[in-house]
Image (tube, rainbow, N blue to C red):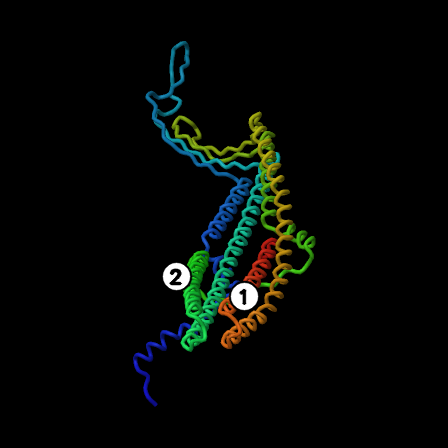
């Protein structure tokens, strides 16, 4: 047995990745995008920010602790004047320089609902950002699915044009042979050569379109634009049901609608929280206070008190009304979006019905177009047909194959659009 040479070994290593590479599925592309796409990372950061806002609102129920300290130097020693047995006298009350410190804890015990409404508003805001994150993921998924299909569509178009070029090349060879035998005119030979050249140009154009489609796909997945792309043609099934049933499902589970509902709730709860701030606020305060003063019996003392604050502010009322008006505006947007979602569902459902019929018709036409080309080429060799008829038959064949491929990928896109309209992509 002859040993493998270095050149052969290098060639084997070069082609090994081709056999080891595994085609990427649409689900794998989705999973990769959820971890790498910049817009999804941004949406996750918004959700984390809303979580911190909720923690902040919840912490308002907890005691607040304030620590203060300082040192004061006066120009004179504070003293009190008095008379003792008719004689004027004075005695110091504190030092000219002294330090102060205090630690005070404050606990709200009654806020008229201000804190609870604030927490409810923060919870609703968090729910809204979570739903927006889901909506962003769905939008990115649909963009990836469209790019995924664009690559497959471009690959199919390239294969069709390559087949077109091979057919016209074989036709040019036949015409050249017949021309050399004096059976056809020079005009036929020139026409065959021109059509073959045009076909090669189409191959170059479609190859370029494929490279662009792959670059767009890689960009959405945050990869290098020139990374190799191998895709597996496998797509999720179409949801079952009539348009009205599917529309009802979409209205119940679309994250955009749920986000608007949560935003409306958040604004309403913020308005209630502001209104509650105009009602009595009761808190318990306690702590330790220290005042450096050698003339006092006790420099440090513990203290506790119950305080009430009642703010009378007309401007706050207008702020609350402004938030309520914003909630009404969002409600109108929500109602408009609901009608748009119904339209999206119906359009996608109808597109599925159309593309399935197109697939059936174009698939039947493929065999007929292939046979039509074969018959015309054979008739041309026998002098019973013209070159124009052969080229026309080839044009019909290519059109039929392109129609079939477009119908297939349009059907896949329609199913994905329906899943996106339902919020389950």
Location of mark 2 (residue): 226
In the rendering, at what x and y percent does residue 401 appear? 54, 66
* Residue at image location 59% in from the left, 68% down from the top: 365
Q: CA distance from mark 1 to mark 2?
A: 35 Å
| Quadrant housing residue 97 | top left
The relative height of residue 346 versus residue 78 in the rendered view (above or below) is below
In the rendering, at what x and y percent does residue 189 appear? 42, 70
* Residue at image location 60% in from the left, 41% down from the top: 333
Location of mark 1 (residue): 396
Q: Nearer the viewer, residue 34 or 394?
A: 394
Q: In the image, which is nearer the foreground, mark 1 or mark 2?
A: 1
Q: Are the residues at dot 1 and dot 2 in contact (C-beta closer than 8 Å)?
A: no
Q: Residue furthest bottom?
A: 1
Local packing at callout 2 (Cα closer than 10 Å; few below 14, some 14-19, many 20+) is few
In the rendering, at what x and y percent does residue 177 appear? 42, 76
Judged from the image, the secondary structure of the residue bearing numbered disc 2 is loop
The relative height of residue 16 versus residue 200 in the rendered view (above or below) is below
> Of the numbered discs in the image, which one, if any, rests on residue 238?
none
Marked residue nearer the N-terminal end (1 or 2): 2
Local packing at callout 1 (Cα closer than 10 Å; few below 14, some 14-19, many 20+) is some
Q: Is residue 111 visible?
A: no
* Residue at image location 55% in from the left, 74% down from the top: 375
Direction from residue 280 to residue 9 in the image, left or right: left
- Quarter placement of the N terminus: bottom left
Q: Is residue 238 visible?
A: yes
Q: Residue furthest top?
A: 86
Direction from residue 339 to residue 59 in the image, left or right: left
Judged from the image, the secondary structure of the residue bearing numbered disc 1 is helix
Q: Nearer the viewer, residue 3 or 275?
A: 3
């Amino acid at each position: 047995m002859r040993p493998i040479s270095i050149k052969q070994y290098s060639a084997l290593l070069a082609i090994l990745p081709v056999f080891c590479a595994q085609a990427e599925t649409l689900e794998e592309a989705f999973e990769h995008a959820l971890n790498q796409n910049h817009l999804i990372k941004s949406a996750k950061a918004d959700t984390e920010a809303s979580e911190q806002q909720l923690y902040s609102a919840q912490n308002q129920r907890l005691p607040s602790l304030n620590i203060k300290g300082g040192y004061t130097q006066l120009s004179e020693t504070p003293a009190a004047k008095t008379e003792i047995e008719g004689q004027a006298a004075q005695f110091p009350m504190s030092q000219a320089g002294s330090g102060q410190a205090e630690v005070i804890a404050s606990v709200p015990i009654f806020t008229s609902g201000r804190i609870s409404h604030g927490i409810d508003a923060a919870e609703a805001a968090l729910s809204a950002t979570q739903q927006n994150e889901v909506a962003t993921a769905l939008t990115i998924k649909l963009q990836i699915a469209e790019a995924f299909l664009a690559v497959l569509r471009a690959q199919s178009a390239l294969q069709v044009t390559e087949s077109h070029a091979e057919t016209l090349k074989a036709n040019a060879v036949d015409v050249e042979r017949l021309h050399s035998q004096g059976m056809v005119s020079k005009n036929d030979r020139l026409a065959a050569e021109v059509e073959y050249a045009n076909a090669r140009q189409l191959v170059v154009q479609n190859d370029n379109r494929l490279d662009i489609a792959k670059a767009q796909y890689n960009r959405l997945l945050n990869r290098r634009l020139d990374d190799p792309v191998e895709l597996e043609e496998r797509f999720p099934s179409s949801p079952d049901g009539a348009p009205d049933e599917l529309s009802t499902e979409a209205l119940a589970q679309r994250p955009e609608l749920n986000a608007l509902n949560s935003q409306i709730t958040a604004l309403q709860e913020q308005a209630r929280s502001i209104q509650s701030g105009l009602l009595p606020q009761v808190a318990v305060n306690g702590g330790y206070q220290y005042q450096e003063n050698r003339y006092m019996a006790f420099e440090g003392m513990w203290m506790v008190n119950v305080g009430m604050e009642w703010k009378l502010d007309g401007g706050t009322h207008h702020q609350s009304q402004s938030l309520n008006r914003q909630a009404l505006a969002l409600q109108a947007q929500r109602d408009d979006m609901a009608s748009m979602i119904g339209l999206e569902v119906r359009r996608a459902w109808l597109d599925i019905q159309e593309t399935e019929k197109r697939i059936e018709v174009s698939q039947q036409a493929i065999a007929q177009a292939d046979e039509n080309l074969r018959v015309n080429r054979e008739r041309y060799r026998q002098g019973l047909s013209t070159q124009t008829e052969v080229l026309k038959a080839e044009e019909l064949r290519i059109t039929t194959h392109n129609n079939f491929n477009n119908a297939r990928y349009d059907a896949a896109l329609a199913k994905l659009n329906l899943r996106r309209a339902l919020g389950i992509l």
